[in-house]
Image (spheres, rainbow, N blue to C red):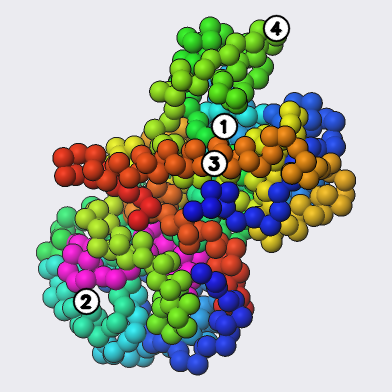
Amino acid sequence: MEIFTEHVNGIMIHKITIGHIHESGCTGCLAALMDNYQGIFTILDKYADLVYGLTLVDVRKIPKMDVALIEGSVCIQDKLATDEVREVRDKSSVVIAIGGCACSGNITRFDRGGQQNQPQHESFVPVSDLIDVDIFVPACAPTPEALRNVCVMTYLLLRGNDEQKALAGMYLKPLMDLARSPYGSKASFNTLMQEVINLGLCMGCGSCAAACPVRAITMEYGKPQGLRDLCVNCGACFSQCPRSFFDHELMEHHEQIMGMLKAVMQ
Amino acid sequence: MNVLGKYKSVVSARSTDKEILKASQDGGIVTSLFAYALEQGIIDGAVLAGPSSRPWQPQPFVATTRAELLKARGTKYNICPQISMLKEATRSYGLDKVGIVGVPCQIQATRKAQLYPIGMRDVPDKIALVVGIYCMEVFPYKGMQLIVEDHAGQKLQSVKKMEIGKGKFTVITERGNVTQLPLKVTHKYEQPGCHVCLDYVANTADVSTGSVGSPDGWSTVFVRSRIGEDVWGKAMAAGCFETKPIDQVKPGLEMVTKLATEKITKNQKTVDERAHFGVGKALRNPYI
Ligand code: SF4
Ligand code: SF4
Ligand code: SF4
C-alpha cells in the first residue's frame, strides 16, 4: 500500500458537507475541534462546508449532509432530542459520535433527573443506543488531533482516490468496529479491565494512564490501577490502549500518514 | 510478514563516548543518540526508564539534561510504563520535541498515540525521536524478584547487571558472583501480555537497537524512518558512533532474524489459539 502525499492536494475539488449536532454535551467537543486553530479554517476552506451547527450556522432545519458530528448524549425523555438524532441519521451518510458523552454517555451517565427546569429529564443514553452510529471518537474532551485525523480520513473515504479510500478505510475500521461493539457504548475503566486486563492482553505501557482526563488511573507494579469513583466513563483509556485495537500494517506507514495529515492541514 | 519490519539501513555500532559506555548494557546507542539529539536541540527532553525507590524497579521519568539521561542506562527487564509520562512530557513539562525510548509495544503505543490520539492531546505532533529496543518479553517486578531472589539466590539490591541471551538469564552481583539460569526456569514468570506481542525489533521506531546480532559490547542498529535517517546520519557525522557493516560481524543479521521469527511465530500461535480458547468461545483478538 502506497500513500502519495502529493495527491492529497490534487483532489480537493469536491468539498463534503458537514454538520455539528449538539445534544446533551458541554460544547467541549466543539471547542476541541476549534482548537485545531488554523487547521479548522483549512478544513473549512478546502475540504468541507459547514452546513449545520448551533450558533455557527444560521440554519434551523437539519439539512442533508455527508458527515454529521454528534456531540453529547441523548435524553430519552426529550422528544426534541430523540426526533433530532433520528432525523440526523436519516439525512447523513456518515454519523460520527464525537466525545465521551455521545459515544458512551460519559458524565451524563450519572444524571438522575430532578433538576429545574426539566426535572423529568433523567435518562441519558449514548447516541448509538438510539441510531446506528458509524464512527466513534471517544474521550472527554476528544482531542483536537483525533478530530482532525478522523475528519481528514472521513474526507478521504468519501472523496479520495482508490488508494486513499483504502487507507482511510483501514484507518477508520477500528473506530467503526468500536461503534458497533457491545462494549463501545458502555465504556468506562471497567472496559479496560474486562476487555484488556482480564483477557491477558495488558503489557503495562501506561497509555491508559496518560489518556485518562481525570487521572483515575495510576500504574502500580507496571499495571493500571483504576480509581473507579473518579472515572467519568469517557472511554479514552480503552481506545488509547494499544491492545484495544492495533493494525500492524497500517501502523507501519505511520510516517507517511503523519506526513499526509500535516500536508493536508497546510 | 517481514519479521524485521521496514528499514533503510542496518549496522553494528558502538558509542564513542567513554562515559556512556561505562555503564551501558551494550553499545550505548540509546544514551548516545539522545545525548546528541538533546545537545543539538533535535529533542528538548526524553521519556526514559529511570531508577525508583525499589531496587531494579524502573520508573518512567522525563530527562532534560545529559546528566539525567545517564541515569537511565542499562536494561531492567521488568515493566516500566513509559507511555504514562508521554502526555506529562508535553503538557506538564512543556516539551515541544519529545524523545522516547521503549520496547516494541511501547513504540506501538507511541505510534497509536500519534495516529489515534484519543486521549493524547498535544502529543501526536510533538514526538521528535522514537528509539526502540529489541524485546523478547519482560517480567512483572515480582516475577523478576522471584527469579533473582528465589532461583538465582541473590538479593535484588546486590545485583549489578542482568542479561538475557544465549538461552540464559544471567545475574551478576556487585561482588562479582555470576549466576545463570536456563530460560526454561524463567518462562513462567513472563508477563502474559507479552505472549501476544508480534514485534521483536520495534518495527515502528525511527531507530531500533539491541545487542542481538552484534559482538559483545556492540549493538545492532536499524535505521527505519526519514527522521531516524536524518538524526542517525547527523550523529554519525558528529562522530558519536563507530560502526561495522552488519555482514562483517558475528553472529550478524541472521541471528536477529532467527530470534524475531521465533518470537513472532510462537506468539502468532498464541493469538491464533485464543480464537478457540473456550468451548466455541474466543478470547478477543486486538489485531483484527
Ligand atoms: S465529551 Fe466531555 S467535552 Fe464533550 S460534551 Fe461530553 S463532557 Fe462535554
Ligand atoms: S494502555 Fe492497555 S496495555 Fe497499556 S497499560 Fe493500559 S491496559 Fe495495559
Ligand atoms: S478511567 Fe479515565 S479514561 Fe478510562 S473511562 Fe474512566 S475517566 Fe475515561
Name the foreground residue: B260 vs A183: B260
Q: Label 1 is placed on what type of residue?
A: Gln
Mark 1 or mark 3, earlier in chain: 1
Residue named by callout 2: A85
Is B101 displayed left or right of B81 in the figure?
right
Residue named by callout 1: B59
**Share a chain, discs 1 and 4?**
yes
Q: Which segment did they paint magenta?
A: A124-152
Is B149 displayed left or right of B250 in the figure?
left
The chain identifier of the residue carrying mark 2 reads: A
Name the foreground residue: A236 vs B160: B160
Instruction: Give the number of the mark in front: 2 or 4.
Output: 4
Q: Position of residue A148 (x, y in %)?
A: 48, 71
Instruction: Using the rendered view, name the quadrant where residue B246 is placed.
Output: top right
For the residue with label 4, is its CB less than 8 Å from the closest atom of ligand 2?
A: no
Is B29 displayed left or right of B272 in the figure?
right
Q: Is residue A98 visible?
A: yes
Q: Label 4 is placed on what type of residue?
A: Arg
Mark 3 or mark 4, earlier in chain: 4
Instruction: Using the rendered view, name the quadrant where residue A159 is placed.
Output: bottom left
Q: Secondary structure at mark 3?
A: helix
Query: How many C-alpha atoms fall within 10 Å of the one at disc 4: few (<14), some, or many (≥20)?
Result: few
In the depicted structure, whether residue B79 falls above or below residue A265:
above
Are the residues tagged 3 and 4 within 8 Å (C-beta)? no
**Share a chain, discs 2 and 4?**
no
Q: Position of residue B196 (x, y in %)?
A: 40, 41
